[in-house]
């Protein structure tokens, strides 16, 4: 049975300042991997000084490949997987975890481990029983949680409280699905912070995240921290300031929430739709999907509601349709972005629309100096 403490049902707004349009700095772009025009998934991260790029389609067919690049963009290797690469997550200091679906219709995950030299990867593959359909993942070795996308409320047929939808699960040592107690409608974007699970819930499959939950996996206690958000499409932890940051595509704003006080702040965006977030030293990067701009917010500055810099990632041209994923290397200041938008199978489509790209701000760039101290 779900328990809801609902301590912060309404967001406390510290400031809401519109971001005025400012000249953007175009960055030199390099295409690292040309993805298929039917590539639909987001799987791409920078971790362990490597860029991990997922590929799942080739001319509408399955093409499950994990590509690894050095921080400077040099390709290190390519490995075949037995399932799609929907999402890629940091697992431990030198490993990532990949979730996806296999041609058997079941959900799978693979742990990819980088060797000490950084030139070879070993794979550990697990098939998840058909009881659970894993979409996204959060956790660490020994504490692993998956979201099942099937848990959406039907307003015409309210859920029987005695039979709650099963939407968040872990796996037992025997490899069996074990469901967590709370019923969460449409769980997505999970994060494990210390021993608590934070995630967004959504009222329908089309709406995106609406409410931010904090779940105690041990007791099943479910606390709604923030409600009434408008289509949250990305949620990240900002460790140095103990914040969560969420990109709200529906409201064209970014909301930050202090994990200690519950105090929130809204940053309005006027020149594009927020789609992806990344930490950049003491700064927050906000990637805008349609305009391919990246705003840099110094969250420690007095006037932190205004970006200190805006970068333009349109330099890759037709090979980079829109901005769907963003990551950064704090050691060099490089950015890594992804365009993955599947063509319609029944309409003509430009084959050069999807790619994984690298952008490199100059050493004298204001954001590189102020955010990273380089």
Image (cartoon, rainbow, N blue to C red):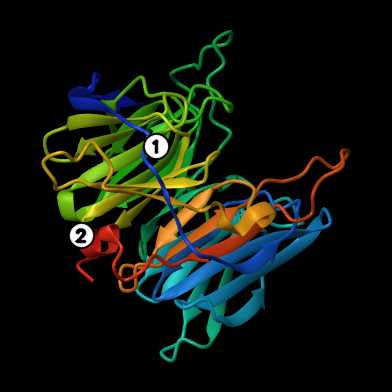
**Label 1 CA crowd tier, 10 Å (few <14, some 14–19, many 20+):** many
* Residue with the mark numbered 2: 370
In x, y percent, where is residue 145?
A: 42, 51
Give the total number of marks visible in the rendering.
2
Would you say 340 lies left or right of 278 here?
right
In x, y percent, where is residue 149?
A: 56, 37
Would you say 285 lies left or right of 316 here?
left
- 79 above or below 155? below
Query: Which type of secondary structure does the marked residue at label 1 adopt?
Result: strand
From this viewpoint, is residue 164 visible? yes
Q: Nearer the viewer, residue 221 or 190?
A: 190
In x, y percent, where is residue 58?
A: 79, 60
Would you say 218 lies left or right of 303 here?
right
- 235 above or below 227? below
* Quadrant showing the C terminus: bottom left
Would you say 162 lies left or right of 129 here?
left
In x, y percent, where is residue 140?
A: 35, 62
From this viewpoint, is residue 107 visible? no
Q: Earlier in the sequence, mark 1 or mark 2?
A: 1
Q: Residue at x 57, y 45 (%)?
A: 132
Query: Which type of secondary structure does the marked residue at label 2 adopt?
Result: helix
* Residue with the mark numbered 1: 247
- 42 above or below 64? above
Quarter of image, res 15: top left
Nearer to us of marks 1 and 2 is 2
Rounded to the nearest whole Å, what is the CA distance between mark 1 and mark 2?
A: 23 Å
Name, please, the residue furthest toward the top. Answer: 156
């Amino acid at each position: 049975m779900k328990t809801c403490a609902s301590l912060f049902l309404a967001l406390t707004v510290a400031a809401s300042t519109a971001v005025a349009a400012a000249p953007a700095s175009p960055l030199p772009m390099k295409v690292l991997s040309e993805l298929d025009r039917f590539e639909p998934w987001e799987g791409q991260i920078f971790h362990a000084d490597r860029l991990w790029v997922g590929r799942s389609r080739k001319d509408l067919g399955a093409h499950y490949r994990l590509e690894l690049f050095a921080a400077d963009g040099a390709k290190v290797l390519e490995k075949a997987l037995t399932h799609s690469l929907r999402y890629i997550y940091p697992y431990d200091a030198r490993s990532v975890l990949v979730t996806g679906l296999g041609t058997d219709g079941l959900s799978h995950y693979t742990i990819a481990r980088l060797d000490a030299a950084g030139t070879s990867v070993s794979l550990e593959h697990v098939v998840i029983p058909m009881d659970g359909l894993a979409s996204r993942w959060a956790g660490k070795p020994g504490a692993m949680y998956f979201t099942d996308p099937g848990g959406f409320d039907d307003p015409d047929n309210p859920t029987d409280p005695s039979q709650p939808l099963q939407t968040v699960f872990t796996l037992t040592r025997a490899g069996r699905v074990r469901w967590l107690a709370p019923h969460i409608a449409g769980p997505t974007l999970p994060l494990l912070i210390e021993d608590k699970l934070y995630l967004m819930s959504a009222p329908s499959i089309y709406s995106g995240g609406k409410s931010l939950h904090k779940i105690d996996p041990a007791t099943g206690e479910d606390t709604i921290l923030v409600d009434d958000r408008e289509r949250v499409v990305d949620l990240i932890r900002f460790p140095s300031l103990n914040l969560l940051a969420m990109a709200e595509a529906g409201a064209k704003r970014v909301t930050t929430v202090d994990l200690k006080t519950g105090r929130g702040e809204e940053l309005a965006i006027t020149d594009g739709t927020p789609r992806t977030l990344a930490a950049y030293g003491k700064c927050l990067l906000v990637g805008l999907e349609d305009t391919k701009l990246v705003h840099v917010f110094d969250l420690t500055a007095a006037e932190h509601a205004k970006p200190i810099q805006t970068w333009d990632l349109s330099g890759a041209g037709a090979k980079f349709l829109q901005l769907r994923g963003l990551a950064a290397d704090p050691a060099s200041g490089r950015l890594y972005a992804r365009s993955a938008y599947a063509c319609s199978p029944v309409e003509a489509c430009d084959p050069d629309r999807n790619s994984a790209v690298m952008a490199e701000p100059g050493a004298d760039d204001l954001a590189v100096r102020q955010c990273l101290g380089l």
